[in-house]
Image (tube, rainbow, N blue to C red):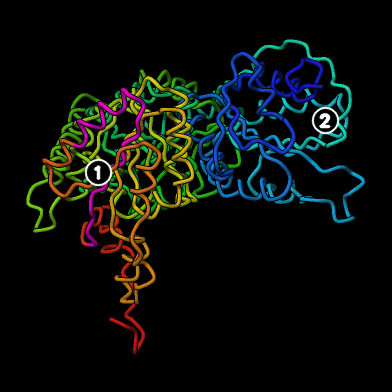
Amino acid sequence: MSVTTENHPWHVVAGTLADAGCDLVVGLPSDEPGLMDAAQAVPGLRVVGVRDQRAGACAAIGHAAVSGRPAVLAVNSGPSFANALTGLLEAGSLGAPVVVVTTRVPALGIGRGAFQHTDQAAMAAPLAKWTFLVEDPRQLTWALRRAVHLAVNGAPGVVLVEIADEVLRAPAPERRPAPPVRRLRFAADAEEVRRAAALLAAARLPVVVAGGGCKPAGAGAAVRRLAELLGAPVFTTAAGRGVLDEEHPLACGLVGLYTTPPADRLLAEADVVLAIGSRLEETARMGWDGLDDKTLVHVDVDPAVFLAALEPEAALLGDAAVVAGQLADALREQTPEAPALAARRAEIAAVRAEMRARNVPADTDGLGLTAPEALRLLQESVGRDATLVQENGLHDMWGYHWPVISVGDGARVVTPGEQTMVGFGLPAAVGAAVADPARRTVLVCGDGAFEMGLAALPTAAELKLGLTVLVLDNRGYGWPRFVRAEERSPDALTRFTAPSHAEAAVRALGCDAVRCTTPAELTAALAAAAKARTEGRTTVITVPAHDADVPVGVRRLFDGHMTPEPPAPGAAA
């Protein structure tokens, strides 16, 4: 019986996922025809084959981030599932709605050396919201729809559905058409909203931090309205970037590790912090002077977020857009007096002006084409509303700093979460480009990350996605090299000595590879990349990066907050 016929269990699985609101199935083909094969016959489902399950998980993240819909990762028990775990760890960190569908070996073989049997639920438990083993065909539709519901509601995240081999060989259950799973929205307690509004209204300098949870809620307009009522500077986390147009007069870039001086002064001076849709992970708190002593108003859909990093004075449980609207309504009669509001806006404007003045690429001090200059030219070429995918290496972290790169509220920004896996960017860019092929998709990464993600490049070539990739190449791993230099430790292991195979691999796939060392060369390469995109060709542009080209946030953190202890006697210089 073909898996594409409506009475095969795999067809029921594919159809149920499509009905529930999924539009992408990504993975590797299984030995026997399975979910990917069945999905090809279901209208509304796109099937993307990858060369590596880890890349598949990252592609699912990128697709979900751009489309706003849950993505499906198809794997099988054993190495297939285990290989996907690094990407799923990142998905869990980001709160990406990824539905993992996998198989379980025949029950008679369990405990008796069954081929490729592994305890998938136990492996996924630390990072999955929910795991379920389907052992009866009558559970199939229910389990899949519940999985999609849990992936998108509350704190979005990873869910796992295992389907026993016996179910896949049994008669298929009846599938009845069903509506898409709805994203549920709910308001915060009215009394808690009043308490929070009073705290914000009485603040001397409130600060708004918008996190990644604002994006699936569509909270951008509500956050902007709230900030304008308060005259408050708005910072975002990396995942929250794009919630507010970064050219808005209240936008002050990113928070924590990625804060661009002198915006850190606004964070230090704030007395009340309004965090919306952010767990306030360590990266968001790095280098924030006095944060523990500030009054926190925290908004999130997940009660587990509260009191995790910091204890809030007011905890508002609800949808980011709905609660931001509630707060704005409550504040309409309590807005700051006009002179105070004007003074706040003037201070923010002065800070933004100084941020611009400090970060206009100028004298390169003999370094040649610097990372900030390369990123500025990239943005001039692709605009402010492209899909921007980033890694988290040393030099590419410049791209997290406004105004080195400035994104509009129409942009799509895809970043790793707190796990910051190396090799995330290229497969995530594949998923992002599949989700919105009409939008330009660009990736900024380091050479080590690019080489680790190379397994995704054949998929980009096959699908003619026309990615633009900017590789900042320091011939090794920049972040550990920088930290070792700060500690005066040996760094030989962080340096690549063998010639890179990446450019040869790029060209072998029919993509374009170019190396640039001057602004003029990069400008020409970016123009050629734009043309190549229209023909479906990916372009990889490599720019040499220098160890001294350290992002301002990293330097600020190490100089002011993480001064290393003196090296031990005998340590290498």
Let me know if residue 202 is in the magenta part. Answer: no
- Residue under pointer 2: 168
Q: What is the secondary structure assignment of the residue under circle 2? A: helix
Up the image or down, 452 lies above or below 247; here it is below
Disc 1 marks a residue whose amino acid type is Val
Q: Are marks 1 and 2 in contact (CB under 8 Å)?
A: no
30 sits left or right of 339 in the view: right
Q: Residues within 10 Å of mark 1 (few under 14, many from 20)?
A: some
Residue range (magenta): 525-547
- Residue under pointer 1: 514
224 sits left or right of 129 in the view: left
Q: Earlier in the sequence, mark 1 or mark 2?
A: 2
Up the image or down, 24 lies above or below 475; here it is above
Give the x, y percent position of residue 365: 9, 58
Q: Is residue 96 visible in the rendered structure shown here?
A: yes
Give the x, y percent position of residue 289: 32, 54
